[in-house]
Image: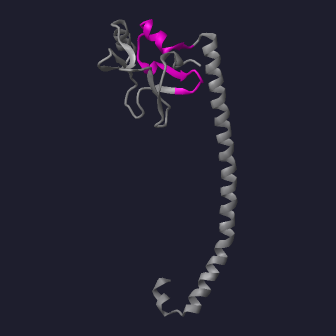
Amino acid sequence: MSDGLGELSDASLTERVDRLVARMRPLDEEVARLRAERDEYLVELRRRERLRSMERRKSVKLDMRAGRAVSIEALIAAAAEGSFDDYRFNLKTGGEVRLGFPGARQQAIAFTDGKQIVQARDFQQAADLFAAGWELGGPGRPGVRVHFPGTRQERLSPAADVFASAAGGS
């Protein structure tokens, strides 16, 4: 087909383009209809995910009120054992968070003795530092650094505002 294009006149090429555009028009309309249908399904999926998220947050808040979730501060003081990954962490607002910096390979909690900072990688390390008199956070900046999963958004929250529940639980 492209071999003889150089021999065709401008009018002939324009006519062929017009015919192709006319043949494509029904296909373009069908693609537009399919995209609209797809978008409708995607909107419904996002709506359902928002509802599930709201229900999870509500459930977390109810667990906190019922005492099924304890603050991370209380867990560390009670010398809980295991990995931070054995627990789910939520702010008092119900939002799920992970410990430490976004993008870190492993969750961690910073402790300070007033001059230096040490990262605890599990509850045993955290309990040992806490028992030795180290405080949560950095020098002059008490709290627990948390980040929201899937984002780069992070914050330093008071330890009493970060709650933990078993990862397999509600």
Span of residues in magenta? 69-96
Report the residue that reaches farthest toward the left. 116
Image height of 23 relative to 52, above or below:
below
Query: Is residue 77 magenta-colored?
Result: yes
Q: Is residue 112 visible?
A: yes
Q: Quadrant of residue 83?
A: top left
What residue is drawn where x is 35% and y is 8%? 133
Q: State left or right for residue 58 relative to residue 79.
A: right
Number of labels in the image equals 0
Q: Is residue 164 visible?
A: no
In the image, 97 versus 161, the foreground residue is 161
Residue 95 image position (x, y, % from top left): 57, 27
Q: Quadrant of residue 9?
A: bottom right
Report the residue that reaches farthest toward the front. 140
Residue 130 image position (x, y, % from top left): 37, 10
Colour scheme = one colour
In the image, 41 versus 76, the foreground residue is 76
Q: Quadrant of the C terminus?
A: top right
What residue is drawn where x is 55% and y is 91%? 10
Image height of 114 relative to 79, above or below:
below
Q: State left or right for residue 4 relative to residue 135.
A: right
Query: Is residue 2 magenta-colored?
Result: no
Residue 64 image position (x, y, % from top left): 60, 15
What residue is drawn where x is 64% and y is 72%? 24
